[in-house]
Image (spheres, helix red, strand yellow):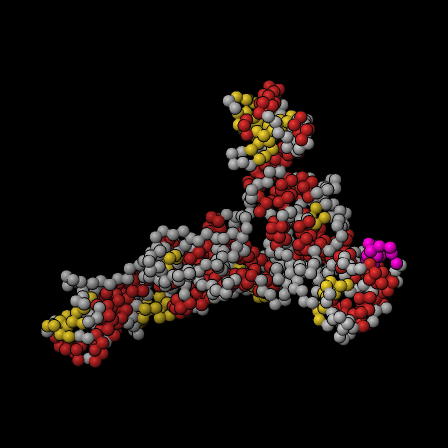
Amino acid sequence: MGTGELDREAHVPARTVGEDDVKGDNGGSGDGGAPRSAPRTLAEALRARGDGGLAELLRARPDLLSPVPNDITQLATRAGTRASVVRALERLDRFALQTAQAMAVAAEPTSYATVLGLLAGDTGDAGEPTTDPAADPAIAAALPRALAVLRAHALVWGDDDQLRLVRTARELLTPSPSHPSPTGLGPTVAESTAGMSPGRLQEILATVGLPATHDSVSAVGGLTALFTDRERMAGLLDTAPPEALAVLDRLVWGPPYGEVTADPAPPVRWLRDHGLLLPASPRTVVLPREAALHLRGGRAHREPEPVAPEVVVATQYRPQVVDSTAAGQAYTALATMEELLKDWQTGGPAVLRAGGLSVRDLKRTAAALDVTEPIASFWIELAYGAGLLASDGEADERYVPTPAYDAWLDLPAADRWTELVAAWLAATRIPGLVGGQDAKGRTLAALGPDLDRGAAPEVRLRVLHLLAELPAGACADADSVLARLRWERPARSVRVDAVDLRSRIAGWTLMEAELLGLTGRGALSAAARALLAADTPADRARLAAAAIAPLFPPPLDHVLLQADLTAVAPGPLERPLADALDVLADVESKGGATVYRFTPASVRRALDAGQAAADLHAFLARHSRTPVPQPLSYLIDDVARKHGHLRIGAASAYVRCDDDALLDEILADRRSQPLRLRRLAPTVLAAQADPASLLEGLRAMGYAPAAESAEGDVLITRADSRRTPPRTPPVPVPDGPPSPDDTLLGAAVKAIRAGDLAATATRKPTPAETAADGRLPRTTPAETLATVQAAALTGSALWIGYVNAEGAASQRVIAPVRVEGGFVTAYDHTADEVRTYPLHRITGVAELADEPHS
């Protein structure tokens, strides 16, 4: 082999099975935490829980409810399936997960003290063994809560001296070459030496000074005892060359695998001869788990994290400053949303064949809103999520506002804002993914598919709640917020440079909350706090609207006309005034005050919409707090005087004018050559262009033509607003089953208890059961009828096997009341109600040894 250390480490990527959702304050298993007698199975442990403990399990793992288990045994079986266990592990906080990982490397069953030693270490500061495993008081204080969480999730069961990890969880978390553990530990001595020859084992025993044995099992036991004996192990390491200790330092915290050549270097050879490196493959060696734990001082993790990181306050502002800043941003959000949808209401961008918005249209929209493309994606997706925007479904499919947009515009500003916030909180579509790539390398488009991530609503809400825990006016440090979220839901990847999706969503949440006005200068506003304090959606909307409404400026009914052909709106305008100004003038700048500029083109736009010059003069005089400037009056009169002097109709197109000199001027202008005009009469010119192109061409030359109808009337060209047919907002894609409410939990627990009663009820064996020695007896129709009739006469309870119309079999305990017409009417102890059952669907019947109590 090469030099005095491992030639190359085997870089086996470490991977946690799953981390995500349950916060550290989920509590323990209540009355199900420590049963009175030691349970032998998970089903027995669950059966010993009270109803509160079962409800807590179903609330923590809602996937167990679909469908409702028939009894405790079925619940325990379902709780141990791989898919359910993986989801449960993903919903653990970091320390609860570290506790489960520590239990996975311990022998089963293990004890509370052993788990505590694996987490806190079992050596003192000087490296000497200590009798107190609780060397770290923070770990000692946090471990009961972590075990309570694991018990509540039915991942751990048993008394503190007989703790057991659910088999599937142990399989997922136990270190192996294909599935390395985040602990960095490798296999045990027994696992590493499974394929080793007995002669080689005896050689290792002789090298480390242990007596020879007659079998491999004893040899492995002796070597394991040596590695777990602190004093003897310390003595063995004292004899190791310094270079060998350096090799161990490289492997001790993982990965524990390393590649070697056929001729190992002396330090590696020494480690192999003493069993401190065992073969994992012909070219790979591994540091056995027992040796690694000794070198670590008994700790399973390098950095246990028993306490959640605190959210740090970066800056403190006065709450009034935060609220005013947030309210200003909230009003800007409403204005931006209106501007976006107003721009798209005459026919928005086309829908891509694969769905979504093209990159060019996104860039154009971002330029129109004067924002970056990621922020434009956010506003577009928010409009879509709120149901204000959708595709029109036409052959030339385009995005246009929905009818809900008109209803939204009629709401007060505070209510419009709360609707946007509610849509944002519930949305599973993530605008931040736009521009990235999916699993197949395709670019993700705004409004396109594959933007849904079920965890988004929960992450957004959690970020806001973390901000709400800070004092009013406190701006949180973003890195500390992300660190807290990563502790509550650890990332699946353990690479240092990995940025998990939840952290990315949290970062986008902080930015989007600022854009919406939920935060001001990074601190949570009073309106957002009111929204988080409410229990129901209706209360959230009402309280948030009441908190922010006083901070919104009242709409104004006037503007200030300036001599430079501009109008200044010192605040938000009433809708009729704002709509009229949008036609008559162009928006030049926005901010606290909006500046409109009057131009010949904008005035002509108002005239094309059917307004007369007198109407425009009266409108400006009525809504201006300053006198109408003379330049503006002259501009309106001048454009109106020229407007419609030229008339354009369809021949394919023609121009007519009573002033033949003006037509001569147009013909003589070289710029008219592309229109290919020729005179048909002194007052009429014909063109080989369509009317729209002719209108555009003459306006580009500085004229003010007007289109006319076939009857010779001036056409009013008012921009028509397009709307989609009625549309419903996109349905959020849930991240697993929804969380059950108290009513559903109560009913489910009751059904499980009743089913368990029927499954475990003591009954008298029937002859058929005795003969067949089967668990579910079957009786003939005659025996079933006779037994049921007898029970109806005596008022006794029976156990029955029953198959419903869907073919689902179940066990029930009933007290027959009446038997007639092929049906039995009975009080069903399982359902806790009177029911009627067809006799032909009863597969078997047996009398109970002891009648149950309902």
Q: Tell me the quarter of the picture where residue 757 sits.
A: top right
Q: Position of residue 818 (x, y in %)?
A: 55, 22
Q: Which residues are magenta?
A: 212-224
Q: Quadrant of the C terminus?
A: top right
For the image, the number of numbered tags is 0
Left or right: 258, with 728 as reference point? right
Within the magenta stretch, is there residue 218?
Answer: yes
Q: Nearer the viewer, residue 345 or 604?
A: 345
Q: Residue at x 54, y 25 (%)?
A: 824
Main SS of the magenta part reads helix
Query: Which residue extends farthest left?
Result: 682
Q: Residue at x 54, y 48 (%)?
A: 737
Q: Tell me the quarter of the picture where residue 629 sits.
A: bottom left
Q: Residue at x 16, y 67 (%)?
A: 651
Q: Position of residue 621 (x, y in %)?
A: 26, 65
Q: Is residue 257 above or below residue 459?
A: below
Q: Nearer the viewer, residue 26 or 222?
A: 222
Q: Is residue 779 above or below residue 697?
A: above
Q: Position of residue 515 (x, y in %)?
A: 47, 63
Within the magenta stretch, is there residue 237?
Answer: no
On the question of residue 727 being in view, the answer is yes
Left or right: 555, with 708 as reference point? right
On the question of residue 125 being in view, the answer is no
Q: Is residue 564 above or below residue 582?
A: below
Q: Residue at x 65, y 64 (%)?
A: 13
Q: Is residue 507 above or below residue 43?
A: below
Q: Position of residue 825 (x, y in %)?
A: 54, 25
Left or right: 434, with 774 as reference point? left
